[in-house]
Image (cartoon, helix red, strand yellow):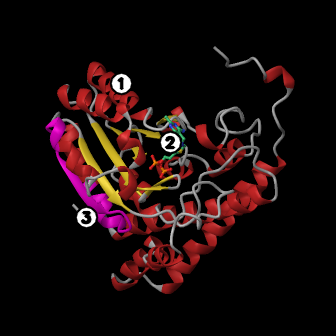
Amino acid sequence: MAPSLDEMIQMYRKMLEIRRFEEAIADLYHRGEVPSSAHLYIGQEAVAVGVCSALRRDDYVLTTHRGHAHNIAKGVSMRRLAAEILGKATGLCKGKGGSMRASSLADGVVYACPIVGSNIPIAAGVGLSIKLRGTDQVVACFFGEGASNIGDFHEGINLAALWRLPVLYVCENNLYALSVSQRRSTLVEDIASRASAYGIPGVVVDGNDVLAVYEAARRAVEDARGGRGPTLIECKTYRWLGHHAGDPGFAYRPKEEVEAWRERCPIKRFRRVLLSRGVTEEELASVEEEVEEAVRDAMDFALESPYPGPEELLRDVY
Ligand SMILES: Cc1ncc(C[n+]2csc(CCOP(=O)(O)OP(=O)(O)O)c2C)c(N)n1
């Protein structure tokens, strides 16, 4: 079932929130306000939003070092996410997680971690917990194509497949793992083809088309809730910027390639779809204004928040 027009406008809003949020974080990073690295998601917005729009509020998400977007798409407060990235006491993890570990259990974002591939078996664990508790929740696990060459990928997906766990494995294939292109690390063209090794469906989707991603995710959610087990969804996309905010991103990628992908902007593309379905310029302009304001508010909140005090140093440490 396709999303309603209202739902599509909400999807547009979320994609734009992610874009503006990431631009603002890049700006703060270059002004020295971000005390860690920040791996930006600009260009990939259709993936996080397409998948999370097919989830329920009580479903779960696991993300990676490139996880701001998955938090926003799942409904996490942009104020508390921005505060976390700036290491502030008002952040999602009291400023102790930072950009790469920002997560919010209350919103279903269970885990964010820069150890590449580590979330894949943990997602199977979350899926097992759902199964043992007997609910019909599902879990979406996001990772890059680089992670699909890590041993955890095999162990995690094999187990989830064997036990028919309710997991969506979402590979965001942005063609590069750090500076290594997929061509230099992997002989198969489609990461999704690896699904056949585990006896589960593997789907390739245009990761810059939010409606296509939504539809693939919706089907996978239906299977997962129905007890038919996991799906591996590969979203072909591209990160516009460097691996992290301090990487110009041009040393290992041809300028023409970056430009060609910028032409395929998932947000502009979806904007055209909305206009063709009867949404007016005025409606979109008011969404755009509200998003700018919400992102400004989030950054102000984060900048004005205090850092945690020394008494916090050993609290929450196990
Ligand atoms: C186990 C492990 N090996 C290496 C690294 C260093 N590292 C950090 S991000 C990254 C690239 C990850 O690429 P991919 O999984 O495709 O995700 P993307 O950054 O493209 O979103 C690497 C190698 C790491 N963090 N963890």
Residue 310 % position (x, y): 86, 24
At label 2, the amino acid type is Thr
Of the pair 262 and 292, the residue shown nearer to us: 262
Q: Nearer the viewer, mark 3 or mark 2?
A: 2
Gap in angstroms between the C-alphas marked 1 and 3: 31 Å
Contact, mark 1 vs mark 3 (Cβ under 8 Å)? no
41 w.r.t. 228: above or below: below
At label 1, the amino acid type is Gly
What residue appears at the point 39 percent right and 55 percent down from the top-left corner? 184
Q: Any mark on residue 2, and which?
A: 3
Image quadrant where one finds the N terminus: bottom left
Residue 228 % position (x, y): 15, 36
What residue appears at the point 34 percent right and 47 percent down from the top-left corner? 170
Q: Which residue is mark 1?
A: 125
Image quadrant assignment for residue 40:
bottom right
Q: In the image, is the residue at mark 2 within 8 Å of ligand 1 by its beta carbon?
A: yes
- Disc 3 crowd, CA 10 A, few/some/many (<14, 14-19, 20+): few
What residue appears at the point 25 percent right and 58 percent down from the top-left corner? 204
Q: Nearer the N terminus, badge 3 or badge 2? A: 3
**Secondary structure of residue under mark 3:** loop
Q: Any mark on residue 64, and which?
A: 2
- The magenta segment is 196-216
At label 3, the amino acid type is Ala
User: Was residue 99 drawn as part of the magenta stretch in this picture?
Assistant: no
Residue 37 % position (x, y): 68, 47
Q: Residue furthest top?
A: 318
Image quadrant assignment for residue 56:
top left
Contact, mark 3 vs mark 2 (Cβ under 8 Å)? no
